Amino acid sequence: MLKILPNLITISRIFLMFPLIYFLNLNEKFFIYQIYSIIFLLIIFLTDVIDGFLARKLNVVTQSGKILDPVSDKICLMVMLIFLIQKCGIIFLIFFILISIRDLLLITLTCYLAINYNYISQANQLGKNFMFSCVIMIIMFVFNFNYFISYAFYIITILLMLFSTLGYMKTHLNNIKKYENI
């Protein structure tokens, strides 16, 4: 059971999105729903931290866990972006399209490496910074933080998306060259 616990925690993050979105849709009506929304956001964030920590601590880091964690992150991110498209409009539709293009490119390269060379890449620091910036930006827009600061984070997040995409692509292409030259 301990061996699959980190992966179960990872998968639980997806299912925690259902009550989060429910409360987010109600949070402007009653203050208590804002509190529930914040609690679910914190729980979802903690599951992202705890699953990796437990996998390393229990020495049960698996290939499936390396795949499930970013997939779970992407599902949660896309659900939040769809919510924000509904709430804020075109600015998040643009972000959704950009991140979809990014993920399609990176998933294609990742799958190529996994299928052909049994190599599963892991997140790098720039990618983690991008995801952290996404979380902060989403929280700012969901809870109507200061307009200027929210849009500044939006721009910072887009820049981090660009730089992390270029970094991942460079790493993936270098790995492809390395494996093809062996």
Image (tube, rainbow, N blue to C red):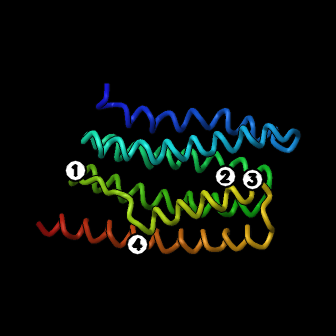
The image quadrant that residue 146 belongs to is bottom right
Q: Amino acid at mark 3?
A: Val
Q: Quick check: marks 2 and 1 in contact, CB under 8 Å?
A: no
For marks 3 and 4 on the same chain, the one whose residue lies earlier in the sequence: 3
Q: Amino acid at mark 4?
A: Gly
In this rendering, position of residue 32 left or right of residue 117: right
Q: Position of residue 150 (x, y in %)?
A: 73, 67
Q: Which is in the foreground here, disc 2 or disc 3?
A: 3
For marks 2 and 3, give the CA distance: 10 Å
Q: Which mark is residue 142?
A: 3
Residue bearing mark 4: 167
Q: What residue is shown at x 57% (from left), y 32% (from top)?
A: 15
In this orientation, which residue lies closer to the viewer: 160 or 132?
Answer: 132
Q: What residue is shown at x 78% (from left), y 73% (from top)?
A: 148
Q: Amino acid at mark 2?
A: Leu
Label 3: few (<14), some (14–19) or many (≥20) C-alpha neighbours in 10 Å: some
Q: Which mark is residue 43?
A: none
In this orientation, which residue lies closer to the viewer: 172 or 70?
Answer: 70
Q: Which is in the foreground here, disc 1 or disc 3?
A: 3
Q: Which is in the foreground here, disc 3 or disc 4?
A: 3
Q: Which mark is residue 81?
A: 2
Label 4: few (<14), some (14–19) or many (≥20) C-alpha neighbours in 10 Å: some
Q: Which mark is residue 118?
A: 1
For marks 2 and 1, give the CA distance: 32 Å
For marks 1 and 3 on the same chain, the one whose residue lies earlier in the sequence: 1
For marks 4 and 1, give the CA distance: 21 Å
Q: Position of residue 138 (x, y in %)?
A: 67, 57
Is disc 1 placed on a helix, strand or loop? loop
Q: Position of residue 74 (x, y in %)?
A: 52, 49
Q: How many numbered markers are drawn?
A: 4
For marks 2 and 3 on the same chain, the one whose residue lies earlier in the sequence: 2
